[in-house]
Image: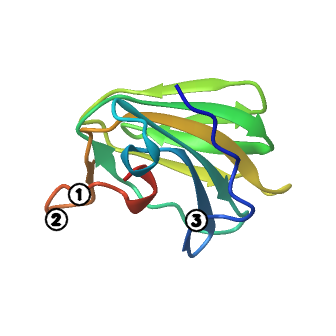
Amino acid sequence: MYIRPRPDSPTHELPGASFTSLATPTTGSFDTAVWEVQLTPGHAPTTHALTRQEVFIITAGQGLATIAGDVHPLTSGDVLVVPAHTAFSLQAGPGGELVALCCFPTDGKGMIGDAEPFTPPWAQ
C-alpha cells in the first residue's frame, strides 16, 4: 500500500482532453490504472475500443457516450461500463466540461481503427 499525492496539473494533454494519471504501473499500481479525464465541450470525440473492460465514474458535468452506435446521456454520478472490443466515444455536453475517473486493467490496450493496439500513456 502507498499514498501518493494527486499531481498538481494534468499529466497528458490531447486536443479537447486532459488526463491526470493517478495510479499506474510506473507509480506502483500493477493491476489497475486509474486516471481522471477532462473533456472540453465542442471537441469531436475519438471513437476507439479497448482490449479490456473500462469503467468511468462521471464526477462532474454532462456529456454523451456513444457505445456500439447507441448514444447515452451522462451526468455527474453516473457509472459507465464499456465492454472490451466495443467501439465507443465520449464527449462533453454543450454546458461545460465532462470530468470522469477511469479504471482500466494495466494489461489493457487501446485500439483506434486498424492501428496496432497500444497502452495509453496516462495508463502506464
Mark 1 or 3, closer to the camera? 3
Amino acid bearing label 1: Phe
Where is mark 2, residue-wise?
115
Depth check, front residue: 6 or 70:
6
Which residue in the rendered view is the most extreme toward the front? 2
Depth check, front residue: 32 or 74:
32
Residue 61 at x, y percent in the picture: 80, 44
Residue 86 at x, y percent in the picture: 30, 36
Report the residue at 63% width, 35% height from top.
Answer: 3
Q: Is residue 15 above or below residue 3?
A: below
Amino acid bearing label 3: Thr
Q: Is residue 14 above or below residue 49?
A: below
Q: Which mark is residue 70?
A: none
Callout 2: few (<14), some (14-19), or many (20+) C-alpha neighbours within 10 Å?
A: few
Where is mark 1, residue-wise?
118
Mark 3 or 2, closer to the camera? 3
Q: Which mark is residue 11?
A: 3
| Mark 1–mark 2 CB contact (< 8 Å) | yes
Q: Is residue 120 left or right of residue 55?
A: left
Q: Is residue 4 left or right of residue 27?
A: right
Callout 1: few (<14), some (14-19), or many (20+) C-alpha neighbours within 10 Å?
A: few
Alpha carbon of mark 1 to alpha carbon of mark 3: how far? 18 Å
Alpha carbon of mark 3 to alpha carbon of mark 2: how far? 24 Å
Q: Is residue 112 left or right of residue 80?
A: left
Q: Tag 1, which secondary structure?
A: loop
